[in-house]
Image: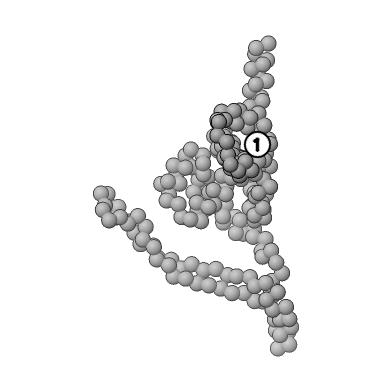
Amino acid sequence: MFEELKIQQQAAVRLQPSFACFDMQAGTSEKLQMVELLWACNFAPLLGELQKANPLITELMMQAVSNTYMPDDEELFMHKQALKFENLLAAMYRCQNQFKMPLWVVLRSVYAMQHGMHLESWNIESAVRLLASHRWTKDLIALATKHSPGAPFHSLAFVTAAVFDNFTVKIDYKSLHDLDHHGYRLDMTNWGSLTIPATTAPDLNIGAVIGSE
């Protein structure tokens, strides 16, 4: 009897599959599904998906952190708590299996890459499963770039804009050095191309101009 109750308890607290958690061992299709979700940029409806998939674990966490605090803004408090629990569950999925990639871990990893997080700090966060690895995130961004859905609006045909910028930054420079490594200077050229909405020039038809020549 006690053994049966133990088995039931273990099953009840086992992490369950969720739409907001992707299995990187499931093949390319799973990763492309994640890329499609990232490009959609509609993450708010997914807040709470991990908790919905794991109601008992969520209830245990709520009981573990409950206190006598009475928030002035109940709605804001509940939203923040949902975000905290969602990220706690995300870390649990990653601790269970490093190939499980919850959406919130992916978003934090892409954000860290975007803002140039120090690699040593990144490796620490990755080791405790709060971030994906630097290499994995870099490969994901490259994959997402190849599968860009394009502009979410009707654009002018045959017209684009491009920008270039020479950029220099000093990395790991300090006023006092106690190591052999004294930092370095990184020179780069950043570029970007812009798609122009058709509404900016509704009567412009470059195709017709080209065809008339």
Q: Residue at x 48, y 55 (%)?
A: 115
Q: Is residue 101 visible?
A: no
Q: Is residue 202 visible?
A: yes
Residue 114 in percent (x, y) is at 51, 56
The image quadrant where one finds the C terminus is bottom right
Coloration mode: one colour
The residue labelled by disc 1 is 51
The image quadrant where one finds the N terminus is top right
Q: Residue at x 65, y 49 (%)?
A: 44
Q: Front-most of 26 and 166?
A: 166
Residue 195 in percent (x, y) is at 63, 70
> Is 61 on the left-hand or right-hand side of 4?
left
Q: Amino acid at mark 1?
A: Gln
SS of the residue under disc 1: helix
Label 1: how many Cα within 10 Å (few below 14, some 14–19, many 20+) = many
Q: Residue at x 65, y 13 (%)?
A: 3
Residue 2 in percent (x, y) is at 65, 12
* Up-down relation of residue 27 to residue 69 (above or below): below
